[in-house]
């Protein structure tokens, strides 16, 4: 089965997320991105719920906008409730502080557009270990 990753983000981050989805596609990782995958006339909530159920990993794009979004928060909570079967990778795109819901999870800091951060994301996505070993060393417990 092909890996499919849910990319949770705020619409203000669409340009970055579109580019990220294309980069992932080039290396064989399929993603669900609402503004790309939901067709006109399709029920938004139904499509998102189906994708959340279908995907085993989520990239939570963290920005000031996503941290204020009730939709992003709902997606994050739904995925976190399903660990250890599902894995959330917080990807810090912008903003001063990490949102509280992800403070106990090791995140990838991309605020300075460091290529090492993108490499780390690819490594985490292609790692077959789904036991949520991607946790912050300050908090050593399975989510």
Image (tube, rainbow, N blue to C red):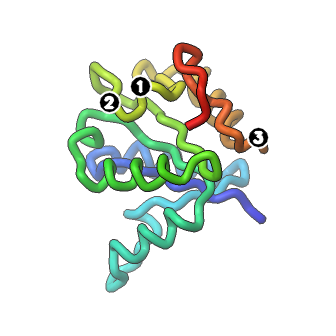
Quarter of the image for the N terminus: give it.
Answer: bottom right
The tag on residue 129 is 3
Nearer to the camera, 143 or 127: 143
Q: Is residue 131 above or below residue 25?
A: above
Q: Is residue 8 above or below residue 94?
A: below
Q: What secondary structure is found at the residue carrying circle 2?
A: loop
Q: Please name the residue shown 21% across and 42% down the image.
A: 68
The tag on residue 32 is none
Question: Label 1, on which residue?
Answer: 103
Residue contact at pointers 2 and 1, CB within 8 angstroms: yes
Q: What secondary structure is found at the residue carrying circle 3?
A: loop
Going by the picture, which residue comes out furthest to the front? 141
- How far across and down, in percent of the image, does residue 99 sit? 32, 30
Q: Please name the residue shown 40% across and 22% down the image.
A: 111
Quadrant of residue 54 within the rendered picture:
bottom right
Residue contact at pointers 1 and 3, CB within 8 angstroms: no
User: How far is the residue under mark 3 from the one under mark 2?
Assistant: 25 Å
- Residue 43 lies left or right of residue 119; in this view the side is left
Quadrant of residue 112 within the rendered picture:
top left
């Amino acid at each position: 089965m092909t890996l499919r990753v849910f990319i949770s983000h705020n619409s203000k981050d669409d340009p970055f997320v579109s580019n990220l989805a294309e980069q992932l596609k080039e290396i064989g990782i399929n993603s669900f991105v609402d503004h790309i995958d939901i067709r006109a006339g399709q029920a938004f909530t139904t499509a998102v719920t189906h994708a959340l159920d279908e995907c085993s990993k989520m990239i939570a794009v963290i920005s000031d906008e996503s941290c204020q979004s009730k939709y992003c928060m709902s997606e994050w909570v739904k995925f976190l409730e399903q660990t250890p079967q599902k894995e959330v990778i917080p990807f810090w795109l912008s903003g001063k502080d990490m949102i509280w819901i992800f403070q106990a999870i090791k995140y990838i800091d991309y605020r300075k557009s460091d290529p090492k951060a993108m490499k780390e994301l690819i490594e985490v996505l292609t790692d077959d270990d789904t036991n949520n070993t991607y946790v912050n060393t300050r908090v050593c417990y399975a989510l």
